Amino acid sequence: MKQKLYILGVITAMITSAGAIFKVNHWPAAAILLIAGTLILVLLFLPAALINNYKATGNSQNKVLYIVTYITCFVVFIAMLFKIMHWPYAGVGLLIALPFPYVVFLPIFLLVTSKNKSFNIYNTVFVLLLLALNSVFSALLALNVSKKTISDSYNLSKNYCNVEAAMTDMKVNVEHSAVNVKIDEVLKIAYNYQDLLLKYEGITREQWEKDPGNLADAESVNLPMVILAGNGESYPGDKLQAALQELVGQMEQSKGYEATAKALPSILGFAGENGIDPDWTHRNVAATNLSWILIYLDGLEANLKMIQASTF
């Protein structure tokens, strides 16, 4: 049994480590490796290791400790997986996972081990050090991106805003065709999204366009979803997704826009393997960092303005 556990442990470590390396280098299959490694860890290796150890050295008095140990590991590793994969409610998961070892595991651990006179105090010190290491790692993970990356992204947004301003000045003679009217509708939705998100930060869209940056919650992932959902959108991003699909359809039906309609999904970055990616706007408008959503909307608006300006 021990030999099988060792083999399973080595395989789990290899898969998880490979997933982390792939993720850092943005290589294909990173997500598959990370998900597989984490699930093998929490669903196979940890239960098997704890059960084996309990049968070998455990007793009825510390049975609760083994159960709580597994629950703690499950909560912490799953929360980390959600954060790494940028899945919805990852922030909520980390808020639960960070204090969980101290609020749930540590009191039970100290209570059970205090009754065991033969328990080595060094084991307690080792557990406390592991908990401290877990907190440091989780805190670093919660940062998600460095301050420098956020600052650089503000410069990108500023460039988008400058392009959009230039395109707006060129729009004086734009023909009010059905396509351009539809583009205006898409822009209106994008502007509304920006207004809602920036209102939470206490700034206007005009202030943001003049000087992007200095967001209080720049790294927040769940906040945009909450803000947009509070505006009546059960699935934030649906409205923008539908408007963009209608724009493509309008271009396909309008003479002279056929080639643009075919290229638009690639230009705006929402092309999937089989046409338009149905989850594209949700990922870009709701389930990512607040700063990146605002930058994405700036880029979308600039591209749409360029398409409009090129039609006169």
Image: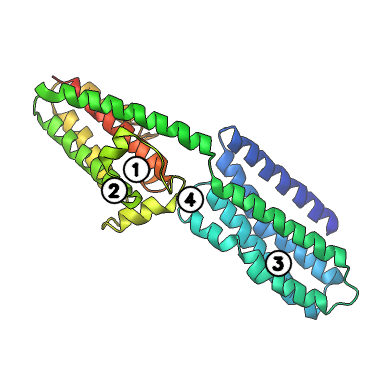
Identify the residue under disc 1.
Answer: 281
Distance Cα–Cα, label 4 vs label 2: 18 Å
Distance Cα–Cα, label 3 vs label 1: 39 Å
Q: Earlier in the sequence, mark 4 or mark 2?
A: 4
Residue 196 x, y percent position in the rendering: 28, 49
Residue 60 x, y percent position in the rendering: 79, 80
Q: Amino acid at mark 4?
A: Trp
> Helix, strand or loop at disc 3?
helix
Q: Which residue does the image show at 17% across and 24% down from the upper left? A: 169
Identify the residue under disc 3.
Answer: 69
Q: Amino acid at mark 2?
A: Asp
> Helix, strand or loop at disc 1?
helix
Identify the residue under disc 2.
Answer: 238
Q: Amino acid at mark 1?
A: Thr
Q: Earlier in the sequence, mark 1 or mark 4?
A: 4
> Helix, strand or loop at disc 4?
loop
Tag 3 near tag 1, CB within 8 Å: no
Tag 4 near tag 2, CB within 8 Å: no
Q: Earlier in the sequence, mark 2 or mark 1?
A: 2
- Seen from the viewer's position, the closer of residues 274 and 224 is 224
Residue 258 x, y percent position in the rendering: 20, 24
Identify the residue under disc 4.
Answer: 87
* Badge 4: residue crowd in 10 Å (few <14, some 14–19, many ≥20): some
Q: Which residue does the image show at 37% across and 41% down from the upper left? A: 293
- Residue 103 visible, this angle: yes
Distance Cα–Cα, label 2 vs label 1: 7 Å
Q: Earlier in the sequence, mark 4 or mark 3?
A: 3
Which quarter of the rendering shows the C terminus?
Answer: top left
Residue 249 image-quadrant placement: top left
